[in-house]
Image: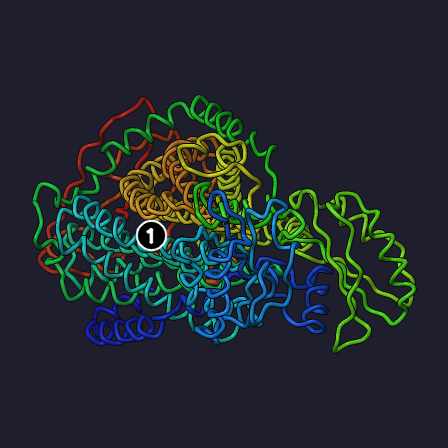
Amino acid sequence: MFAWWGALVSRVRFVVIGMVAAALLGLAWYGTGLDDRLSSGGMFDPTAESSQAAQVADAAFGRNHEGDVLVLYTAPEGRTVDDPEFAGKVVESLDSLPKRFPEQISGINAAYWRTETGKISGSRVATADLKHAFAAIAIRGDDDTTMVRNYRAVKDAFAIPGVDVRVGGLQPVAGALNDTIASDIHRMELLAFPAVGVLLFFIFGGLVAASLPLIVGGLTVFGAFGIVKLLTEFTEVNSFVSAVVSMIGFGLAIDYGLFIVSRFREELAEGYDTPAAVRRTVMTAGRTVVFSAAMIIASLGGMLLFPQGFLKSIAYGAIATVSMAALTAITILPAILAVLGPRVDLLGIKRFRKTKSADEVENGFWGRSTRAVMRHPIKVAVPIVAGLVLLILPIGNLVFGGLSEKYLPPDNPTRLAQQEFDHLFPLRKSDPIELVFRGADTAAIGALWKQANTAPGLAAPFGVPSRSTTDAEVFRTTAALTDSDDAGLTIDYLRALEQPDSVRMLVGGVPALQKDSIDALLFWIPWMVALVVLLTTVLMFLTFGSLVLPIKAALMSALGLGSTLGILTWIFIDGHGATLLNFTPQPITAPVLVVIMAIIYGLSTDYEVFLLSRMVEARAQGASTTEAVRIGTAHTGRIITAAAAILLVVVGAFAFSDLVMMQYIAFGMIAALIIDATVLRMLLVPATMKLLGDDCWWAPPWMKRIQQKVGLGEPVLDDAHPRNADPVDLVRTTPVTDPVTLQIPAVYEPDPPPRPRTRQRRPPPARTVSTDTDVLPTTPIHR
């Protein structure tokens, strides 16, 4: 299939370029204005009791807007909030807000001073010394997406000249989080894009070759934005998606472009003409890109198991982005290469542009280092595994938490305003516990209410339940907690109360929503792990025909993921580096942890696929296990290192984020990339495969037959050879170190097509690199 596709793309290259470019640019145009369609919601389990409480309360009382915007006013030194001049300015501002922004602001829910639309006034909204008072302002909207958009339009309207005004509340916190994500993406565009361009120039040694992955990366990201905007027509999409799409899409698309362009230049250097080079590139690197994307999609798809809309929207956006990256890598990029041909090396520096021969690559740094590792596999593997286990140990301190203003930097104005408000008005916090009663038996409701007031952890008793004006059988009451981050005991106590048959009491509020969300995540994480491991194992078996390799890959990925989570726990929960990175140590947001697990496992599998594909390709051409490992590592070592470096630059732009959630993902990916691209892929994998020997390729015969029927095995490139040259004998041009006799199955001995005017080349003399010997095949194995 890939051979046919590569030949087709080469033949109709201009059609492919025109169609794919038009489609991607159309998606990019459609994706403009995406920010206004994104939401801050989706963090909670919609099937939980707390979500049911919110749904019942919203239906009976309307959306609760009491904590939308909390504006804190501080009187000047020596005066109070009753000062006529000070109060006059505040009242004038509050009265003008609904008039100036009738589409965004519905009114003033509470204020110390009497206002035209105020519902509450008096001492309850001022401190005892009358130095501080606040107003609660309602933002229009019945869903998170609308409210985020409306608040963005009025966020600068609360300032008053000459008055100390601080703005907190649910919508300002959500808005600050969204604005931080937008600035992170802008930083990536300003810093990462040029830096990646410079890296690519030195990797390829030319402007033309370096520009190709950048073009693919840009088209991928902007096209993915269009798909994400389309998703907003059908479901709520969290604003966090845009950062994930930018980071994963740009990094992966460039990595895929790097693999494709590098393989194309290799084929040209081997002497193939442009059509053959394009076809062979798609058959090898293109095939690997597709299977790599499939592995990542399988990993990301595990997030679809969770009920939270946040995780589903991240999964949809990330899957669309990875699919787009793979699609561009096997369509428009090969088509452009077919147009350019050898001109891909134009506008470069010859010193950096030189493509090494297979013999030079296999006996270069990566080949020599891999040979050294395989000479002492146990001495290499044991210390590495021990070190990774030590990195995993801090996971014991892993604690889950919910989303709050603490995820903003300690000096962020919105965070400071919210913290000061919570300190001055502890009973007016925006995250109280909520009880929703459904039933007509008011006596039973009263009895339950009295029992609820005996719950531990309450800062004050629950207020008298209020009856809905639209549904006479629904009542609601709230109470503040002494510590919202430790509400589990209170929630469990309330839910354990015995309820009469005539009344149903639902426990809700932000603390209950967060607890239920964490419980759902802890329940589904093992299922996600099992599903992802199963899918990636099946895909990897169908790709490589071995059952041992996917199991080994899963264990390697588990080591890498565990050590990465240990590092994140040590930094962000234990607090090492908090001052330098400007964040507050705190429990990790549980949904973000799931995102990190899915992304890191997917990337780990991605590099494993590229590494193993080259090993299997060498094995299919007749190399022994040891030589296949060395050849595969040598040919992918530089490329994987370059790909990891590029992704590190892209991710590094987000490491400077003011949002600790983005720092979680950025530093998690940085740690995972370093561990995967060096410790695992270049040291532990060769050592492990050397210890396993030929067992690496084992699978039950019946599974082998299935794999052969499915037809996803590594292709044997036997039908296209460089003009005026004999096929390269991979085994004869590389030193063999296995102390076993190499047996070449007949299936790997295809007869080359007749080629006129070619000269039979003598095999080079055998080179001895170790005391191991091997019997070489007498039939040439064609690359």
Question: Residue 200 at what x, y percent from top left?
Answer: 21, 48
Density class for disc 1 (Cα within 10 Å; few <14, some 14-19, many ≥20) is many
- Name the residue located 31 percent from the left edge and 33 percent from the top edge: 736
Judge from the rendering whether residue 619 lies leftward or rightward of residue 69; answer left or right. Answer: left
Judge from the rendering whether residue 371 lies leftward or rightward of residue 59; answer left or right. Answer: left
- Name the residue located 32 percent from the left edge and 63 percent from the top edge: 220
Q: Closer to the camera, 720 or 558?
A: 558
Q: Which residue is mark 1?
A: 251
Quadrant of res 52: bottom right
Judge from the rendering whether residue 429 lies leftward or rightward of residue 490; answer left or right. Answer: left
Instruction: Work out which residue is located at the far front of the displayed protein and give it.
Output: 84
Q: So how many labels did they put on this image?
A: 1
Question: Residue 130 at what x, y percent from top left?
Answer: 58, 48
- Can residue 119 be seen in this snapshot? yes
- For the N terminus, which image quadrant? bottom left
Q: Closer to the camera, 613 or 216?
A: 216
Could you say whether the residue bearing mark 1 is in a helix, strand or loop? helix
- Can residue 288 be seen in this snapshot? no
Question: Residue 570 at what x, y percent from top left?
Answer: 51, 32
Report the amino acid beneath label 1: Gly
Asked if residue 490 is positioned above or below residue 575 in the image, the reply reads: below
Q: Closer to the camera, 54 or 564?
A: 54
